[in-house]
Image (tube, rainbow, N blue to C red):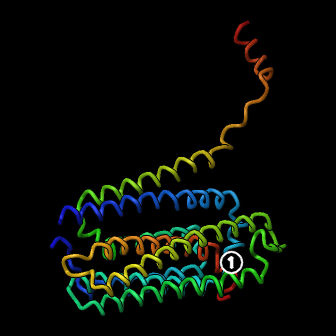
Amino acid sequence: MSGHIVPVRIYLGVFLALLALTALTTAVAFYDLGKWNTVAALAIAVTKMLLVILFFMHLKYSSGLTRLILLAGFFWFALLVALTLSDELTRNWTPPPGPWSALLPFLHRLIL
Amino acid sequence: MDQQHEAGNLGMWVFLVTEIMFFGGLFACYTIYRALHLEAFETGSRLLEVQFGAANTAVLIGSSLTMALAIHAAQAGKRKSHIIFYLILTMILGALFLGLKFTFEWHHDYIEHLVPGFGFAYTGPYAPGVEMFFCFYFFMTGLHALHMIVGLGVLTVLTIMAARGRFSAEYYYPLEVSGLYWHFVDIVWIFLFPLLYLIGGRYAMGGGH
């Protein structure tokens, strides 16, 4: 049959690794690491996600098409976050334009 | 049969990608408002009970394990009692998660007046931003809980199918496809836990809570 049978010991190993990472991420949150707190929390979460996807969800044994579809999903999610943030975080870079009359001295110099 | 198996799996993955976008909108909103109101979100995060979040993470990881073992039992051609045992264990862990969430956490938040719209009465620093954090908290965990409830319904149907002897080493696809959904819901929680409970500077409280 098509389904790849994953040995039970791999499932148990992944389970224990996930528990250990949960304990680790909780423990790390109690130490002041500045910006690295967020980085560590997200890095551990991504590691846990990969463990679940690869082994529990059998992606390690799946077809390239399945992986491509999942990658497309993550790609669109990255676009969603990156483009929205790029708007929100750069709004103060340029001041809002004033009334058009503020441009008059500049235009005068340009013409005369 | 191989092609049907592949197509069924692929269909579920496509559905899960739409779910990524569904939750992704919320995660993107959360990221932006967190960037805009960092202090308020960190204050709100510290008001959550981290031990419940961590315990629930462990419970949900356990339910993912038993779900994987249920599929494994079917694949390996074990007796149907094996499959039913793991499915029921998965449901018990899923129900335990929801029980902890509703009766301990949400109830506790309600008593502490932290539920926006239901007597929200936090008056400390950054109160409007903290209220926004709790809106995110209840909406995101609520949507996740809703997915868990749907998952419990799916598991009930699977248990009935297993009891009727529908699954074998040749045919276990409903189990596998439902398992993908269950693991996805687990992954959503794997991200919600650090985002809501942890990255709010727990160290600032002088350890423990």
Residue B135 versus residue B91 in the image, above or below: above
Q: Is residue A64 visible?
A: yes
Image point 26% across, 69% down: which residue?
Answer: A60
- Say which residue label 1 marks: B46
Snapshot quadrant of residue B111: bottom right
* Crowdedness near tag 1: few (<14), some (14–19) or many (≥20) residues, C-alpha within 10 Å: many
Residue A6 versus residue A42 in the image, above or below: below
Residue that lies at the very extreme toward the left in this rendered image: A1
Q: Return the x and y of residue B200 as percentages of the image width and height.
A: 64, 73
Which quarter of the image is occupied by the N terminus of chain B? bottom left
State left or right for residue B95 relative to residue B123.
Answer: left
State left or right for residue B208 relative to residue B70.
Answer: right
Q: Return the x and y of residue B84 as percentages of the image width and height.
A: 35, 89
Residue type, mark 1 in image = Arg
Comparing B207 with B106, the one in front is: B106
Image point 51% across, 82% down: which residue?
Answer: B57
Image point 78% across, 68% down: which residue?
Answer: B117
Q: Return the x and y of residue B112 as percentages of the image width and height.
A: 77, 82
